[in-house]
Image: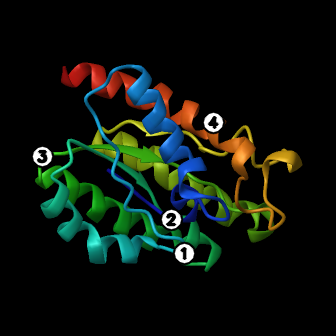
């Protein structure tokens, strides 16, 4: 199951062109028995994720949750410590239901200042280490600064970028799936 925001919801493009759909195609090509359930909502925050995670876990009973939240919190200037607390609570709830977690990390634009952007980003590797879970370094690393891979808003990747994002996530998801078999 993917719990994310607009980056995972495929903002600005047909849903079947987003990275989650591209990743599902990879799973299908690998003859994987896994099906991705995309519970991502554009604009979602860590608080929004907390409000709906229990119902989603109960309904779908996922083996692994790809957690891609926090960017909208950061864009709203929420204190990084509160973002971290919410992510920690999400991870705990997921783990309490017996699912694994793959944390997908995000960055926010540099105009928020080096101190804030560093504190924001460091939440992800810090939580991964603290909670002993895998994480994907900035999932837009190869696309965020490539103008031809971003939508006109400069925040959302376009269709061309989606396979790169899916491949980056796949590199970290594949070992988790392999260890489950």
Please state the horizontal and vertical placement of residue 54, each as a whole percent of the image. 19, 68
Cα separation between marks 1 and 2:
6 Å
Q: Which tag is nearer the camera, tag 1 or tag 3?
A: 1
Please state the horizontal and vertical placement of residue 109, each as a whole percent of the image. 75, 62
Q: Which tag is nearer the camera, tag 1 or tag 4?
A: 4
Q: Residue at x 48, y 37 (%)?
A: 23
Mark 2 touches mark 3? (CB < 8 Å): no
Cα separation between marks 1 and 4:
22 Å
Would you name the residue on which mark 2 appears? 5
Mark 4 touches mark 2? (CB < 8 Å): no
Please state the horizontal and vertical placement of residue 97, each as a whole percent of the image. 12, 53
Q: Residue at x 27, y 64 (%)?
A: 89
Q: Earlier in the sequence, mark 1 or mark 4?
A: 1
Cα separation between marks 2 and 3:
23 Å
Q: Residues within 10 Å of mark 3 (few under 14, many from 20)?
A: some
Q: Which image quadrant is residue 92 in?
A: bottom left
Q: Residues within 10 Å of mark 1 (few under 14, many from 20)?
A: some
Secondary element at tag 1: loop
Cα separation between marks 1 and 3:
27 Å
Would you name the residue on which mark 3 appears? 98
Q: Earlier in the sequence, mark 2 or mark 3?
A: 2
Q: Which tag is nearer the camera, tag 4 or tag 2?
A: 4
Front one among 36 and 170 = 36
Secondary element at tag 2: loop
Mark 1 touches mark 2? (CB < 8 Å): yes
Q: Earlier in the sequence, mark 4 or mark 3?
A: 3
Q: Which mark is residue 43?
A: 1
Would you name the residue on which mark 4 appears? 163
Q: Residue at x 65, y 59 (%)?
A: 13
Please state the horizontal and vertical placement of residue 40, each as a whole percent of the image. 43, 63
């Amino acid at each position: 199951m993917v719990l994310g925001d607009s980056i995972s919801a495929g903002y600005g493009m047909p849903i079947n062109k987003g990275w989650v759909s591209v990743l599902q195609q990879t799973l299908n090509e690998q003859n994987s028995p896994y099906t991705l359930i995309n519970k991502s909502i554009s604009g979602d925050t860590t608080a929004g994720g907390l409000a709906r995670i229990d119902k989603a876990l109960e309904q779908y009973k996922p083996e692994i949750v790809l957690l891609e939240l926090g960017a909208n919190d950061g864009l709203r200037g929420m204190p990084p410590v509160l973002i971290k607390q919410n992510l920690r609570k999400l991870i705990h709830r997921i783990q309490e239901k017996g699912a694994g977690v793959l944390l997908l990390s995000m960055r926010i634009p540099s105009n928020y200042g080096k101190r804030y952007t560093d504190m924001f980003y460091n939440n992800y590797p810090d939580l991964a280490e603290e909670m002993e879970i895998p994480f994907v370094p900035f999932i837009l690393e190869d696309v965020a600064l490539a103008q031809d891979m971003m939508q006109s808003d400069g925040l959302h990747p376009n269709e061309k970028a989606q396979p790169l994002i899916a491949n980056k996530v796949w590199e970290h998801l594949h070992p988790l799936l392999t260890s489950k078999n």
